[in-house]
Structure formats: structure tokens, C-alpha cells
Image: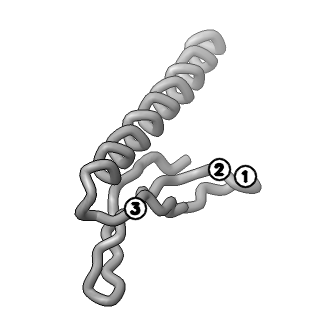
Amino acid sequence: MRVGCGLRVHRIDGNGYLYFWHYEREGGRSRRREDYIGPARESASRREAARKQLAYYRRIQTDVASKIARLERSI
């Protein structure tokens, strides 16, 4: 299982476009995905990126807590 996410700016014709990258499980494997957020210079894009990061880490926190609980029960 790969855990992680971040932001990346792609430059196209001198303009920056913000993308949120993260890992997802697909077909039993971890795969890195990139989601377009918006123009990097816009504050709304930066807020949306922060919201996506927070949601990702909350989901991972829940998944890890579930795996820990399963392991504790098996010991």
C-alpha cells in the first residue's frame, strides 16, 4: 500500500495549472493519479487543493486505523 499525496504545477504556454496527485488502489495495486484543480494563480484553486489533501489524509487515517484494529484483534 502506498500512501501519499501532494500538489504539482504543470506549465503550459507560460501558465501554471495546479494538479493534486495521490495514490489509489486499482486492481489490487497502488496507482498514482493526478486530478486537475485549476489555474495555480487563483486562490480558489489553492483552497480546493487544501480541501482535497485534508480529505485524502482523513480517509487514509481511517483506513490505517481499521487495519491496526484488525491486527490487534488477531494478536
Quarter the C terminus occupies = top right
> How far from the left and from the top, in percent, is residue 61?
46, 27
Which numbered disc, 3 or 2, marks the residue that appears first in the sequence? 2
Q: Amino acid at mark 1?
A: Gly
Q: Amino acid at mark 3?
A: Gly
| Residue 50: quarter of image | top left
The answer to whether residue 56 is left or right of residue 75 is left
Residue under numbered circle 1: 28
**What secondary structure is found at the residue carrying circle 2?**
strand
The answer for how far apart the CA atoms under marks 1 and 3 are is: 30 Å
Residue drawn at the location 25% of the way across and 51% of the way down: 43
| Residue 48: quarter of image | top left
Of residues 67 and 60, the one nearer the viewer is 60
Q: Nearer the viewer, mark 1 or mark 3?
A: 3
> How far from the left and from the top, in percent, is residue 56?
46, 39
Question: Above or below — where is 75 with respect to 52?
Answer: above
The answer for how far apart the CA atoms under marks 3 and 2 are is: 25 Å
**What secondary structure is found at the residue carrying circle 1?**
loop
**Label placed on residue 38:** 3
Q: Residues within 10 Å of mark 2 (few under 14, many from 20)?
A: few
Q: Amino acid at mark 2?
A: Arg
**Label placed on residue 25:** 2
Q: Do the residues bearing badges 2 and 1 touch, measured as CB atoms within 8 Å?
A: yes
The answer for how far apart the CA atoms under marks 2 and 1 are is: 6 Å
> How far from the left and from the top, in percent, is residue 62?
52, 24
Residue drawn at the location 35% of the way across and 76% of the way down: 10
